[in-house]
Amino acid sequence: MLNIMETNKLYLGNCIDVMATFPNECIDLTVTSPPYDNMRTYNNTCEWNFDVFKKVAKELFRITKWGGVIVWVVSDSTNDGTESGTSFKQALYFMEIGFNLHDTMIWAKDGGGAIGSNLCYTQNFEYMFVLSKGKPQHVNIIKDKKNLSFGNTKTTGRRKVTGEMKIEHRVCSEYSRRNNWWLVMPQKQEGSDWHPAVFPESIALDHIRTWSNEGDIVLDPFLGSGTTAKMAVKAKRRYIGIEKCEEYFKLAKKRIWNEERQLTLF
C-alpha cells in the first residue's frame, strides 16, 4: 500500500496497476487528459478502449476522497462521417458508478483545429468534464472576467417566504466569475517537441486552483510530459503522477525538477 504521506512522486507503469496499490479515498483532485479514441500512438505504449477506461474509472472512484473532484479532458474522433461519442459515454459511465457531473466545461482553442470533413464545421474544442464524489469540498471560483458595469449600483429584488419583497442595492465589482468555456491559445511550451499532445499549463493550473487547496494531493494517472504535476508544484499542492512511457516519464521528471528548483530560488 502507498503511504498517504508519500507524495510528490512519479510512478513509471500502468496506471491501473499503480492505482490499485493506493489506499481508499486518498486523492483530493485528479486533473488528466486520457488518450482520445487511439488518435495518437504515444510511442506504441497505450492500449486504450472502453473496457480499459472502465477499470480506470472504478479505481479513480475508489481512491478519490468524498468531496474530491476529477477533471477529465477529452475529445472524440470522427470516422466515416460520424463522431465516436466516446467522451459522452465516459461521462455517463462516471455517473453510473457514483460520480456527480458537476460541470461540463469547454476548452476552446483559437487556431486551426482539426480539419475533419468538409461537410461539418472545423472542430476547435475539447470537453472538460468536472466530476465530483459527492458535493465538491473545495470550490475557489476564478473571478477574472472584466465587469462592464464596474462601479455601478445594481438593484435586485427577491421575495421572502412571507411574501414581502426585499430590495437590495449592490455596487458591481471590477471582476466577475468567468464562463465555463475557457479560451486557451495554443502555446509553445517545454515538452511539446517530444510529446504529441502537451497539456496547456494554464488549464491545469486554473483547475488545480479552483478545485483544491494548498497542501492537497493532485493526481494525474496519464501524466504525459508532466504538466499537471508541474502546475501542482507551482500551486503549492502535493502531486502524484503515473506514466507508462519511459521517454515521457523522463521528460516529466525533468520539467517538475526545473519547477521545484525555480521555487527554491525565490
Image: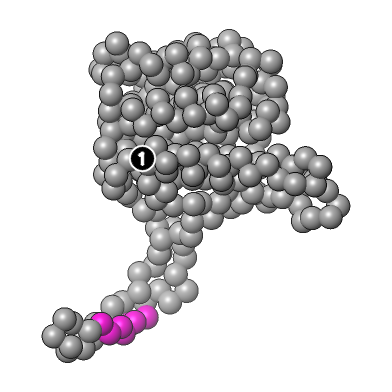
- At x 61%, y 40%, the residue is 86
Write down the quadrant of residue 137 in the picture: top left
Considering every residue shown, the one lying at the far left of the view is 162
In the rendered structure, which segment of residues is drawn in magenta?
A: 152-158
Depicted 151 relative to depicted 69: above or below: below
Depicted 84 relative to depicted 196: above or below: below
Give percent across and percent down for residue 176. Answer: 40, 64
Q: Nearer the viewer, residue 217 or 78?
A: 78
- At x 74%, y 42%, the residue is 78
Q: Nearer the viewer, residue 183 or 102?
A: 102
Give percent across and percent down for residue 215. Answer: 27, 31
**Can I make out residue 265 in this image?**
no
Q: Nearer the viewer, residue 118 or 152?
A: 118
What is the image's colouring?
Answer: one colour
Give percent across and percent down for residue 75. Answer: 62, 41
**Can I make out residue 151 in this image?**
yes
- Dot 1 falls on a residue whose secondary structure is loop
Depicted 132 relative to depicted 217: above or below: below
- At x 40%, y 18%, the residue is 19
Q: Is residue 182 left or right of residue 99?
A: right
**Residue 154 drawn in magenta:** yes
| Residue under numbered circle 1 | 98
Q: Amino acid at mark 1?
A: Gly
Quadrant location of the N terminus?
top left
Depicted 176 relative to depicted 35: above or below: below
Write down the quadrant of residue 68 in the picture: top left
Give percent across and percent down for residue 126. Answer: 61, 45
- At x 55%, y 51%, the residue is 106
**Magenta stretch: dominant secondary structure:** strand
**Residue 197 drawn in magenta:** no
Q: Nearer the viewer, residue 158 or 150?
A: 158
Callout 1 environment at 10 Å: few (<14), some (14 to 19), or many (20+)?
some
